[in-house]
């Protein structure tokens, strides 16, 4: 048996993004563990969770709604990354790597939304 979301490349990519965020936030100051790090982790996990939860909804409209929520979580992650960079917790190189990963994931989610929309129009 398998779950529908396990077949989605975007879900697999979101798991990779989670690992990247966790790896880099482990180096943040201890004083940020319950503030910025916690917020980043919750936001990045929300991406994968919403993809998974939405994939099991009965309608494409509901799935798209969950995918859009995932996009909102990516925006939240990116904003946290800017804050981390501004506070010098991330250097430019690490910021750029994570920013590029966020862009790639956003593009994949938007592509999936378009694919589902096109299927509905047929």
Image (cartoon, rainbow, N blue to C red):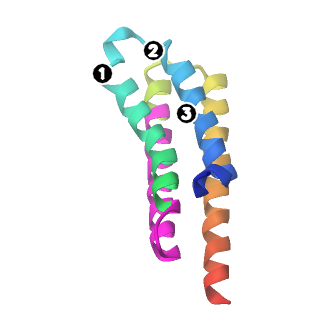
Front tag of 1 and 2: 1
Horizontal and vertical percent for residue 101?
Answer: 65, 39
Q: Are marks 2 and 3 in contact (CB under 8 Å)?
A: no
Is disc 3 placed on a helix, strand or loop? helix
Horizontal and vertical percent for residue 78?
Answer: 50, 40
Residue that sits furthest to the bottom in the current view: 122
Q: Are marks 1 and 2 in contact (CB under 8 Å)?
A: no
User: From mark 1 to mark 2, how far is it between C-alphas?
Assistant: 11 Å
Q: Examine the rendered structure and indicate whether residue 43 appears above or below residue 62.
A: above
Circle 1 residues within 10 Å: few <14, some 14–19, many ≥20: few
Q: Examine the rendered structure and indicate whether residue 93 appears above or below residue 53.
A: above
Is disc 1 placed on a helix, strand or loop? loop
Count of labels in the image = 3
Circle 2 residues within 10 Å: few <14, some 14–19, many ≥20: some
| Magenta: main secondary structure | helix
Q: Is residue 80 magenta?
A: yes
* Quadrant of residue 46 within the rendered picture: top left
Q: Which stretch appears magenta?
A: 55-81
Instruction: List the residue tagged with mark 3.
Output: 18
Circle 3 residues within 10 Å: few <14, some 14–19, many ≥20: many
* Quadrant position of the C terminus in the picture: bottom right
Q: Residue at x 48, y 76 (%)?
A: 59
Horizontal and vertical percent for residue 8?
Answer: 66, 54
User: From mark 3 to mark 1, how far is it between C-alphas?
Assistant: 17 Å
Instruction: List the residue tagged with mark 2.
Output: 28
Q: Residue at x 54, y 28 (%)?
A: 21
Instruction: List the residue tagged with mark 1.
Output: 34
Horizontal and vertical percent for residue 93?
Answer: 67, 24
Q: Is residue 74 magenta?
A: yes
Q: Examine the rendered structure and indicate whether residue 85 appears above or below residue 43.
A: above
């Amino acid at each position: 048996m398998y779950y529908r979301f396990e077949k989605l490349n975007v879900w697999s990519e979101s798991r990779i993004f989670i690992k990247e965020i966790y790896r880099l936030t482990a180096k943040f100051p201890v004083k940020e563990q319950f503030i910025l790090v916690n917020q980043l982790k919750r936001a990045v996990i929300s991406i994968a969770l919403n993809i998974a939860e939405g994939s099991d909804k009965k309608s494409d409209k509901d799935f798209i709604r969950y995918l859009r929520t995932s996009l909102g979580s990516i925006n939240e992650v990116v904003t946290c990354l800017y804050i981390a960079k501004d506070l010098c917790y991330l250097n430019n190189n690490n910021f750029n790597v994570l920013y590029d990963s966020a862009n790639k994931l956003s593009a994949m989610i938007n592509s999936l939304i378009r694919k589902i929309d096109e299927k509905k129009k047929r």
